Image (cartoon, rainbow, N blue to C red):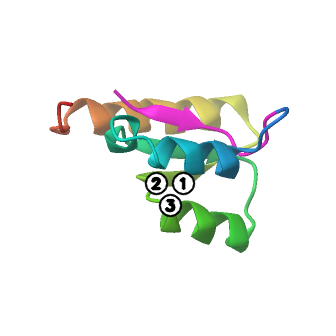
Amino acid sequence: DIILLDLNMPKINGIEFLEILKNDAVLKFIPTIILTTSSNQKDLLACYNLGIAGYILKPLKYEDYMSKIEKLLAYWSINELKKV
């Protein structure tokens, strides 16, 4: 399992959600990858400080976006993840 998380969400932003997620005894072990348009260094550092597994900027072109998603899924499909 992995979680793909956008930082720009309604009602609660992605960093707030990430804080809740990483404070949960079980859910904190699920690798969380940020998939966002934010290239803000402050966001990047805040997410890594909370324990994300990766930070991916959404490209503008659909083909580039799909390529990044395919590579992401291929990478995580061969990893041995902790079973909770």
Q: Is residue 3 magenta?
A: yes
Asked if one can make out residue 58 in the rendered structure from this viewpoint, the answer is: no
In the picture, which quadrant includes the C terminus?
top left
Please identify, in this view, whether the residue under mark 1 or under mark 3 is nearer the observer.
Answer: 3
Residue, x 46% and y 54% (percent of image)?
52
Which type of secondary structure does the marked residue at label 2 adopt? loop
Residue, x 66% and y 52% (percent of image)?
15
Disc 2 and disc 1 in contact, CB within 8 angstroms: yes
Counting from the top left corner in percent of width and height, residue 82 is at 18, 38
Asked if one can make out residue 6 in the rendered structure from this viewpoint, the answer is: yes
- For residue 52, the mark is 2
Left or right of 52: which side holds 10?
A: right
Which one is nearer the viewer's eye here, 12 or 48? 12
- For residue 55, the mark is 1
According to the image, label 3 marks what residue?
A: 50
In the picture, which quadrant includes the N terminus?
top left
Which one is nearer the viewer's eye here, 47 or 67? 47
Q: Amino acid at mark 2?
A: Ile
Counting from the top left corner in percent of width and height, residue 30 is at 36, 37
Residue, x 32% and y 32% (percent of image)?
74
Counting from the top left corner in percent of width and height, residue 14 is at 68, 45
Distance from disc 1 to disc 3, alpha carbons, whole Å, reads 12 Å
Which region of the structure is painted magenta? 1-9
